[in-house]
Amino acid sequence: MSGQPNVLFIISDQHNAKVMGHQGHPSVRTPNLDALAAGGVRFDNAITQNPICTPSRMCYLSGQYAHNHGYYGLGGPRPHGLPTLLGHFRRSGYRTAAAGKIHCPEYWVEEDSDFFREVCGCSVGGCAEYNAHLQERGLLELRDDLSYPEHGGRGRQSVDGRASNIPYEDSPEGWVVRQVMGFMERSAEEGRPFLAHVSLPKPHQIYAPSEPFWSLYDEEDLVLPPNAQYDMARKAPHLRQAAEHWRRGEWALFEPRTFEAARLRKLHGYLGCVSQVDHAVGELMAWLREAGLEEDTIVIYCTDHGDYACEHGNMEKAPGICSDAITRIPFLWSWKGRFAAGHVVPGIVETVDLSATLCALCDLEPMETSDGKDLSHLLGGESGEVHRVGVTEFAWSKSLRRGDYRYVHYVPEMFPEEYSKGFGELYDLQADPWEMDSLFFEPGYADLVQEMRAELLDWLIATTRPATVLPMPRQEGWQFLTRGQSSVNRDGKFPPRLVTQLRSRNYL
């Protein structure tokens, strides 16, 4: 061991923060995630910066808010000059790996990884190695993690559920875990610290968990969330429209093809997929113990965004800005003997905090391009506010979490016909944890709505990374590019903290 800790950064896709045993879910089985939480630190109010895959993953790996890196859709061209967490650690002597469903802009993560494996075709290079593995095993034609082959085009990204054709050891999760174990073993043999980014595709649909995870659950015993069906008159128009679509049941592929039966199959498959992810996490933790690396490795489990998991009548994640089910995520940290075992942090933290915290824990220079904050003191058992608010962003809408309240802001252009005077959402999560009663139009909450709106405006202004201001601050160091009297980070912008250090306020 080099003296610096290893990092095992595990991210799943679309895991609802309520759907874990230690969060009191009535049906799901997650023994390994429960053990990780019990042996480490769990953040109960961790907020994702974006409610879809690519932008959220970019927030983790760059440490930047979405309005700074500028990506709100899936995929896209490589960001000009934007550093990644993997590249930053690699420059500091770490071996880096990215394996699984990476789902980032082209060539951004690939070129900062000593070891790269993709399983879902969401990154450059596709999933050639994984498909070759399935071909060798005679399973390629049965592959059903991206679509149900027996249903052709209708089967792609379906939210209906059944058991997978593929055994766990040959599933994307099983294959990725083995790939990463090999990488970690080789790094340990070389005496080099590693940063392994493990991206597990589930529990994102297709909801076809391998055995034995499908058979862990019986649909007759499943408990629907309290907000599975209620009067949604105060909800956002596009959420109501989505719920109406799902209720028609036209998406059902298997018998019986009623909404009620298909909804239970979706929940059945989703819970099985969560348990499959849990098992993969358990395999990685067991490998660390057997390799004698548990006390030398920081482990993080999180997800890119949540899933409705049948909340609000919806079957997947869209429209995600509307719900705590999507914007709040699991965030578990473990480092045996170093973090406060069993510590629960109730305060708001954000996904951009990953980079700042890992740099501090691994004694690396902070990433100047990161917007995040260091959570090290909380991991040591301390308390205190890190963020007054936590914000999830779409291009035309934002969700702001502050204390027990969650406010959603939509620009007037979102719903001009239904709400000519504007529309928003406001929830008291203490009184209404399942978000069934929006307070936005209640006269008694008008002042709070205005206060939250002003808070969001201040946050957007104060966290934006400018390309130029007057006067321009001058900085030194390898993370800055200096031309004449101007200094900017490698992404062509500079940190908001430098704005606060300017003596002149004339042009701010």
Image (cartoon, rainbow, N blue to C red):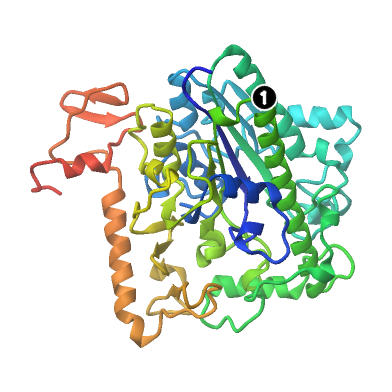
**Location of residue 456 in the rendering, given as x and y in whole percent from the top left corner:** 33, 62
Q: Give SS at disc 1.
A: loop
* Quadrant holding the N terminus: top right
- In front: 404, or 128? 404
- Residue at 35 percent across and 81 percent down: it is 445
Q: Residue furthest bottom?
A: 443
- In front: 116, or 244? 116
Callout 1, which amino acid? Ala
- In front: 262, or 341? 341
Query: Neighbour class for label 1 at 10 Å: few (<14), some, many (≥20)?
Result: few
**Location of residue 225 in the rendering, given as x and y in whole percent from the top left corner:** 66, 72
Q: How many marks?
A: 1
Q: Say which quarter of the image contains residue 228.
A: bottom right
Q: Say which quarter of the image contains residue 491.
A: top left
**Location of residue 139 in the rendering, given as x and y in whole percent from the top left corner:** 88, 36
**Location of residue 374 in the rendering, given as x and y in whole percent from the top left corner:** 37, 41
- Residue at 43 percent across and 50 percent down: it is 350
Q: Would you place residue 435 above or below residue 491 in this image?
A: below
Q: Is residue 59 left or right of residue 145?
A: left
Residue tagged 1: 291
Q: Residue furthest top?
A: 190
Q: Is residue 158 visible?
A: no
Q: Is residue 205 left or right of residue 463?
A: right
Q: Would you place residue 136 above or below residue 312 in this image?
A: above
- In front: 471, or 360? 360
Q: Is residue 221 visible?
A: yes
Q: Say which quarter of the image contains residue 497.
A: top left
Q: Is residue 361 left or right of residue 54?
A: left
